[in-house]
Amino acid sequence: MRPIRRGDFGDAVRDIQHRLLEAGLSVDASELEGHFGPSTEAAVREFQQRRGLVSDGLVGLDTWGRLVEAGHRLGDRTLYLRHPSFRGDDVVELQRRLNSLGFDAGKEDGLFGPRTSEAVNEFQVNVGGEGDGIVGTETVSALARLRPTPEGPSRAMVREEEDLRRMDSSIVGAVVAIDPGHGPSDPGNVGPSGLVETDVTLLLADALAEELAARGAVPKPLRSNAEDPTPSGRARAANDIGATVCVSLHLNAGEPEAEGATCFYFGTPATHSPAGRRLAEVIQEELTSRLGLKDGRVHPLAIDILRETRMPAVQVEPCFLTNEKEERMLADGRTRRDIAAAIVDGIERFFRAAPDEGTAADRAGYS
């Protein structure tokens, strides 16, 4: 799908505009007949910021999917476990309510998966129902009768953060999913001398796989040179192989002087993955200390590879491909091996128990 952008006209733009209006955003009346003008672009950017997406004003697959999901309200449709999973704001609200009541629906990602289904089943049995895992009018009404969602972090975040504090494992035997970003249909960014992102991410993936194997881990690449899976397909593959963690490799782009490393983890303005954040932080620290890269910090992002994976997942962007110096670094095999070693150092640190810095439970006053 070619992203829909400023200057486009037609029914698809009109559909986007009406969904933006339903989400409470404003579009100038002069643009509402399908003209993707400045006010439509501004509304798209604001929507993306609210959803934890890259705020570029372009309506690609991620943004379009979230616009569709935003139109669903809990009770508007019957929810149950199926493939592909139900997605939407109604699922987020269901997960939020279940978690607040002590039923473990997992991270509040808007995907009705096995964990959410199990939580629904348990809730239904506890309120005297059949426990069929189907969220219809009776289940929605039962949820509505109970106490409101409390303020503070969700219990899903609290549980994940508590598990993280107790973690004391080893990289040996760990299955690490490696996602070389982009592919044949979307080669990504191009450097000043012509280095292409999809080619570099494959080379980085090879270096990362070698380093992981040398330390006893089990690397599992999610695509080869000829393959071109969707982001959802990559997340599904990582889930299917039972990966312990997932590392997606991309390269940044910007003005010629822009430089440095950045890591992303799953997060929106309403929720995030504490384990994903911790993994991003330790990898970022290793990249900047080992290679002397400028620290672009870690950031939350709700793209599919981070949102749909069931294990801690990060997107690592170690360099700006559009920076001449960093492009030369990426073209050098030794530097790629250094980048891989830094990422694996971070993964090893992640498996060790994190320092006690106060948990979401402490901050929220949960016992």
Image: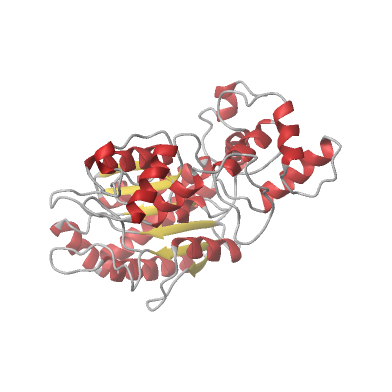
Location of the N terminus by quadrant is: bottom left
Which residue is painted at 27% across and 69% down in the image? 333
Percent position of residue 304, x then y: 46, 54
**Left of 25 or right of it: where is 153?**
right
Percent position of residue 141, x then y: 73, 33
**Residue closer to the observer: 160 or 127:** 127
**Residue closer to the observer: 54 or 12:** 12
Quarter-of-image position of residue 142: top right
319 lies above or below 128: below
**Left of 200 or right of it: where is 18?**
right
**Residue closer to the observer: 174 or 27:** 27
Residue at the outermost bottom position: 226
Percent position of residue 290, x then y: 31, 51
Q: How is the image coloured?
A: secondary structure
Location of the C terminus by quadrant is: top right
Which residue is painted at 29% across and 42% down in the image? 40
Quarter-of-image position of residue 281: top left
Which residue is painted at 26% across and 43% down in the image? 31
Q: Is residue 345 visible?
A: yes
Total marks shown come to 0
**Residue closer to the observer: 21 or 105:** 21
Percent position of residue 329, x then y: 21, 62
Q: Is residue 300 visible?
A: no
